[in-house]
Image (cartoon, helix red, strand yellow):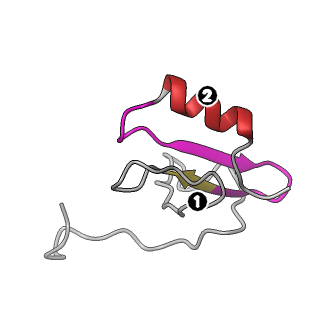
């Protein structure tokens, strides 16, 4: 079906998660594709445009979901000047 928010999902998000920092995560279970839906700077919310993300590995170093639309990126080290 793809990653999207239905009209009902959008209604729920607007009414129960109205803060600009609150996001919606949709995981499409059949293809293991996921994306975050966020409000734009002007407050608009597009239920068809999602943004990717990075998953932090758990204690065993493996994801519990077999993602199809994410690429693993090596963790930054403390020697990296951008490490926080």
For label 2, the residue is: 12
Query: Which label sits on residue 50?
Result: 1
Give x and y (percent) for residue 67. Answer: 69, 61
Q: Nearer the viewer, mark 2 or mark 1?
A: 2
Q: Earlier in the sequence, mark 2 or mark 1?
A: 2
Picture coordinates of residue 55, whole percent (x, y): 51, 56
The answer to whether the residue labelled 2 contacts the one labelled 1, judged by CB atoms less than 8 Å apart, is no
Seen in the image, is 75 located left or right of residue 78? right
Residue at point 55%, 42% (across, down): 24
At x 86% / y 53%, what residue is drawn? Answer: 30
Residue under the image location 13 percent in, 76 percent down = 81
Asked whether 81 or 11 is in front, the reply is: 11
- Which residue: 36% across, 41% down? 20
- Residue 5: x, y in percent? 69, 46
Q: Where is residue 38 in the image (x, y as percent from the top left)?
A: 47, 50
Tell me where residue 10 sits by quadrant.
top right
Nearest to the observer: residue 63 or residue 28: 28
Q: Residues in magenta?
A: 18-34
């Amino acid at each position: 079906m793809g990653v999207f928010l239905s009209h009902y999902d959008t209604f729920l998000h607007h009414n129960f998660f109205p803060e600009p920092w609150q996001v919606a995560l949709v995981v499409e279970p059949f293809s293991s594709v996921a994306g975050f839906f966020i409000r734009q700077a002007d407050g608009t919310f597009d239920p068809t445009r999602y943004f990717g993300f990075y998953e932090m590995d758990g204690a065993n170093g493996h994801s519990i979901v077999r993602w199809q639309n994410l690429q693993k990126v090596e963790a930054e080290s403390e020697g990296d000047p951008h490490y926080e």
